[in-house]
Image (cartoon, helix red, strand yellow):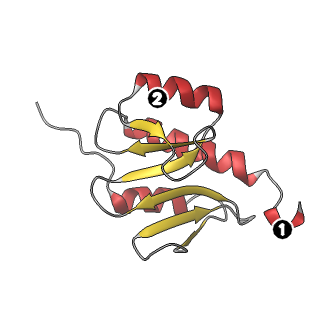
Amino acid sequence: MSRVKTMDWEALRGFCLALPGATETFPFEPSVSVFKAANGRMFGVTDTHDPLDISVKCDPERATSLRAEYDGIVEGYHLDKRHWITITLGGDVPDDLVRELVEDSYDLVASKAPARSR
């Protein structure tokens, strides 16, 4: 039985940057990427170190059920624990679900007005 290749750093980064108007910034340190929608709101935070993970915004009810179902999904690391989750890649979370959750996070923040205009 062959092992299924899991998403690596370059694939994750490429997927995030392929979303409409997405940009990558490094406000914390060089190894921590912050992905933002065109309106400047953050939709993903990832660190290039092993194990590879990404924090994304998530509906609170869905976040609770995902954390119960997957060992590789926990409360958002250094983020609002109710609205953010951290997903560890290469474990029990399928790559398709990782992509879905990144897209959902992007959709949640892309429709919001920029912070400076609120």
Q: Position of residue 73 (x, y in %)?
A: 42, 36
Whether residues under marks 2 and 1 lie with C-beta atoms below 8 angstroms apart, the answer is no
> At which x and y percent is residue 14?
45, 62
Tell me what residue is drawn at x 84 percent, y 68 percent.
116
The residue drawn where x is 55% and y is 55% is: 44
- Amino acid marked by disc 2: Arg
Q: Position of residue 54 (x, y in %)?
A: 45, 51
Q: Residue at x 45, y 41 (%)?
A: 98
Residue 116: image tag: 1
- Residue 92 placement, left or right of 1: right
Q: Residue furthest left?
A: 1
Image quarter hosting the C terminus: bottom right
Along the line of sight, the residue nearer the viewer: 25 or 5: 25
Q: Determine the CA span between mark 2 and mark 1.
A: 32 Å
Disc 1 crowd rating (10 Å Cα; few below 14, some 14-19, many 20+) is: few
Q: Residues within 10 Å of mark 2 (few under 14, many from 20)?
A: some
Number of labels in the image equals 2
Under tag 1, what secondary structure? helix
Tell me what residue is drawn at x 23 percent, y 39 percent.
4
Q: Quadrant of residue 36?
A: bottom right
Q: Quadrant of the N terminus?
A: top left
In this view, 34 is above or below 87: below
The residue under label 1 is which amino acid type?
A: Arg
- Residue 81 is situated, as x and y percent measured from the top left of the image, at 57, 41
User: Which mark sits nearer the N-terminus, 2 or 1?
Assistant: 2
Q: Going by the image, does 57 lie left or right of 98?
A: right
Q: Is residue 58 left or right of residue 16?
A: right
Q: Nearer the viewer, residue 49 or 94?
A: 49
Q: Which residue is mark 2?
A: 67
Q: Is residue 36 above or below residue 79?
A: below
